[in-house]
Image (spheres, helix red, strand yellow):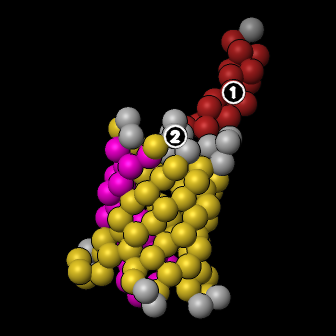
Amino acid sequence: MAELTGPWLGSYWQAKDPTRFEATFVQARNSLSGRIVDDGPLGEAQVHGQVTGRHISFTKTYFNNPSYTTQYTGTVSEDGDHITGQWRQNSRHSGSWEAHRSDNDLSKELRAVLEKNVPELASTKG
């Protein structure tokens, strides 16, 4: 099963126009939750869904308009770092979407800084 917990960056397309978004997913077994912030007028939304193998499905509900929901389905790449799929609000509003893991992995950045600084600390003690 895919593990989606963490930050993601993506886009969805409506009438050939892309909208960027930032997502933070939290996965517990095959249950998925989190938040998405669209780079558009609708803003932040809550996410609830599930992960089955490499298949993902969730509902996005906007905080500023809870009646405005969007259904997402997608497939996670084999390496677990990319998702592609379709979104749908109703028969007139649907399109494709994609997301990839964000490079904003602060723990990875911290490890890199520590690894870089450890040799300097060791040479000053000797």
**In the rendered image, which residue does mark 1 sit on?**
115
Q: Position of residue 94 (x, y in %)?
A: 50, 81
Q: Name the residue under label 2.
A: 53
From the viewer's perspective, is residue 62 above or below residue 29?
A: below
Write the start and end of the magenta stretch as one range.
31-51
Secondary structure of the magenta portion, mostly?
strand
Q: In this view, does 13 lie to the left or right of 65?
A: right
Residue 35 shows in the view: no
Q: In this view, does 48 lie above or below 37?
A: above
Is residue 37 something that shows in the picture?
Answer: yes
Q: How far apart are marks 1 and 2 (CA)?
A: 35 Å
- The reply, left or right, for residue 116 in relation to residue 23 is right
Q: Check disc 1 and give the amino acid type.
A: Glu
Q: Return the residue found at the far front.
A: 91
Q: What residue type is labelled 2?
A: Gly
Residue at image coords 69%, 27%:
115
Say which element carries label 2: loop
Nearest to the observer: residue 51 or residue 115: 51
Along the polypeptide, which appears first: circle 1 or circle 2? 2
Seen as rendered, the residue at the extreme left is 66
Residue at position x 67%, y 35% from top?
112
Residue drawn at point x = 51 percent, y = 36 percent:
1
Image coordinates of residue 123 in percent, x first then y, are 76, 16
What x and y, as percent, mark residue 22? Answer: 50, 65
Label 1 packing within 10 angstroms: few (<14), some (14-19), many (20+): few
The quadrant of the picture occupied by the C terminus is top right
For disc 2, the neighbor class at 10 Å (few under 14, some 14 to 19, many from 20) is few
Q: In this view, does 60 lie above or below 92?
A: above
Give the x, y percent position of residue 39.
Answer: 50, 79
Residue 126 numbered tag = none
- Locate residue 62: give its quadrant: bottom left
